[in-house]
Image (cartoon, rainbow, N blue to C red):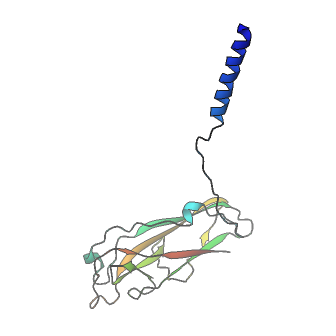
């Protein structure tokens, strides 16, 4: 009789433990997003959309058509297969600047300046134009660029106006 009571107590105890283990203790959802592209290289998530901090730039650096310090930015490529295509060119597009020839327009309260994108050697890349070709290597690659803020081309009549700004450029890769 004692054995039956012990078995009953143990059985109930196991049922309680098993019941609490299967109780909802939280959960959620994981969403995986991406795309499949017809290209010799993959683009990791951090290189599809990113921000280049330009800093707080003094109007004195921009007036007279001056420019800020160039800020480096990179586009990472991975898993490159160069068996047929061995170079890549990058084209940047966006709203053209009314202030800076071949520059990218800024939006916000700041005025009379524009973003200029260059290759890593400092050669200006006009919006809509292809960058110089960059050689690809098997595996990972880094496409290096720079950007700076430049004051209005009409330096005499349009000094830089202080304020916040941002600018959005998109890029497209072209393999050869």
Left or right of 7 on screen, residue 55: left
Left or right of 104 on screen, residue 33: right
Which residue is at 30% across, 79% downward?
62
Image coordinates of residue 3 in percent, x first then y, are: 73, 9
Task: Answer above or below: position of 29 versus 164.
Answer: above
Image coordinates of residue 73 in percent, x first then y, are: 48, 66
The quadrant where residue 131 appears: bottom right
The quadrant where residue 109 appears: bottom left
Task: Answer above or below: position of 69 versus 154.
Answer: above
The quadrant where residue 146 appears: bottom left
Work out whether residue 32 or residue 29 is closer to the camera in this orientation and state it: 29
**How many marks are shown on the rendered structure?**
0
Q: In the current view of this chain or complex, which residue is farthest to the left? A: 60
Image coordinates of residue 52 in percent, x first then y, are: 44, 67
Which residue is at 68% across, 69% downward?
86
Q: The N terminus lies in which quarter of the figure?
A: top right
Q: In the current view of this chain or complex, which residue is farthest to the front? A: 1
Image coordinates of residue 96 in percent, x first then y, are: 46, 85
Work out whether residue 85 or residue 97 is closer to the camera in this orientation and state it: 97
Left or right of 47 on screen, residue 114: left
Which residue is at 55% across, 83% downward?
129
Work out whether residue 3 or residue 156 is closer to the camera in this orientation and state it: 3
Task: Answer above or below: position of 45 versus 20.
Answer: below
Task: Answer above or below: position of 44 versus 147.
Answer: above
Q: The C terminus lies in which quarter of the figure?
A: bottom right
């Amino acid at each position: 009789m004692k054995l039956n009571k012990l078995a009953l107590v143990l059985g109930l105890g196991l049922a309680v433990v098993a019941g609490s283990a299967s109780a909802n203790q939280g959960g959620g959802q994981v969403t995986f997003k991406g795309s499949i592209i017809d290209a010799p290289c993959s683009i990791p998530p951090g290189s599809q959309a990113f921000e280049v901090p330009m800093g707080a730039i003094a109007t004195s650096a921009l007036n007279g058509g001056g420019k800020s310090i160039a800020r480096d930015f990179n586009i990472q490529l991975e898993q490159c297969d160069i068996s047929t295509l061995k170079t890549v060119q990058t084209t940047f597009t966006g709203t053209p600047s009314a202030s800076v020839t071949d520059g990218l327009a800024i939006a916000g309260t700041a005025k009379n300046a524009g973003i200029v994108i260059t290759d890593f050697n400092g050669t200006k890349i006009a919006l809509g134009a292809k960058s110089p070709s960059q050689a690809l290597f098997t595996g990972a690659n880094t496409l290096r660029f720079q950007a700076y803020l430049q004051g209005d081309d009409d330096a005499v009549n349009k000094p830089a106006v202080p304020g916040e700004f941002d600018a959005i450029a998109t890029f497209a890769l072209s393999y050869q």
